[in-house]
Amino acid sequence: MAYIEKYTTQKGTLWRFQISYTDPATGKRLKKSKSGFRLQKEARIAAEELESQLLNGFIDSRMTFNQVYRQWFDNYKLTVKESTWTTTKRNFENHILPAFGNEIIGKITPAKCQLIVNEWFKKPLKNYKRFANNISGVFKYAVRLKIVKSNPIDAIIIPSNRRQMIKKSKKSMYYSRNELQKFLECLQESGTQQAYTFLGCLRLLVCVRVKYSHYSGETSIFLNTK
C-alpha cells in the first residue's frame, strides 16, 4: 500500500508517495518514492502503476550489470565444463565488464549494446559474436528474475563475420617472402623427421611457371607452393 502525503514548497503545495517492497533479486527491503505531483490524484495514479509493476515482479532495480553477472556466473559454472567457464570469465573480465560493468542494468539500451558490438567488430576482435551471446545470457537471466523487462541484445544487428574475415584476410592469410624464409629456416633447424617430411613434400609441390610479358618480352618465374 502506497503512502501519499502533501508537502509545502516555495512553489506551493505538492503531493508525493512512498512504497516499500522486497527486491526479488536480493531479498532486501527497499523503498521507492516520487514527489512533485500537483494533484493528489496524479500521485495516486503513479503509485498504483508502480505497485502493479511490483506485484508482477518487475522492479526498478539499482543493480549494476556486474552484480547481475556475478549471480548469473555462479549458476552458469554449474552447467558447463571448467575450460568453458574459464574462457567465458576471461571474456567478461577483458572485454564485457569494462564496457558494461558499472552500468545500472535496467538502463542499458539496445543503442549502447549496438555501439559496443560494432566497436569490437571494427578492432577487429574475432570473438565479438561470442561476447554478444555472453551479454545476452546475463540479460536472459535478469529477465527470468524480473530484474529487467527485456533483453536489449535481441534488438541489435550483429555484424557479418564474412566482412570481418575479408578485411583480416588481406593482412594475415599469406606469409611475406621474409616470413616464409624464416619459417622454413626454423623448420629445417628443428631437425625432426616431421620437418624433413614436410620440406620434402613442399619441394615436390613447387611448380615453376613462366610468364611472358606482352610488353617487354621479359620472363618472370613464380614459385607456387599451393
Image (cartoon, rainbow, N blue to C red):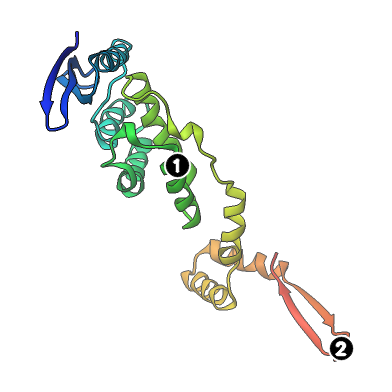
Image: 164 above or below 223:
above
> Residue 197, position in %: x, y?
60, 63
> Residue 71, position in %: x, y?
26, 28
Image: 173 above or below 96:
below
Query: Which is nearer the eye, 88 or 56?
Result: 56
Query: Which is nearer the eye, 121 or 84?
Result: 121
Q: Quadrant of residue 9?
A: top left
Image: 70 above or below 38:
below
Question: Mark 2 or 1 closer to N-term?
Answer: 1
Amino acid beneath label 2: Tyr
Image: 145 above or below 177:
above
Q: How far, Cα to Cα, is label 2 from label 1?
A: 56 Å
Residue neighbourhood size for the residue with mark 2, other residues' Cα within 10 Å, grouped as few (<14), some (14–19), many (≥20): few
Amino acid beneath label 1: Ala
Residue at x-position 24% and y-position 18%: 39
Mark 2 or 1: in front is: 1
Query: Which is nearer the eye, 153 or 39?
Result: 39
Residue at x-position 45% and y-position 39%: 132
Q: Quadrant of the N terminus?
A: top left
Residue neighbourhood size for the residue with mark 1, other residues' Cα within 10 Å, grouped as few (<14), some (14–19), many (≥20): few
SS class of the residue under badge 2?
loop
How many discs mark residues in the rendered view?
2
Give the side of residue 158 with respect to residue 75, left or right: right
Give the side of residue 56 with respect to residue 126, left or right: left
SS class of the residue under badge 1?
helix
Give the residue pinned by disc 2.
Answer: 215
Q: Quadrant of the C terminus?
A: bottom right
Q: Quadrant of residue 12?
A: top left
Q: Which mark is residue 100?
A: none
Give the residue pinned by disc 1.
Answer: 111
> Residue 113, position in %: x, y?
43, 41
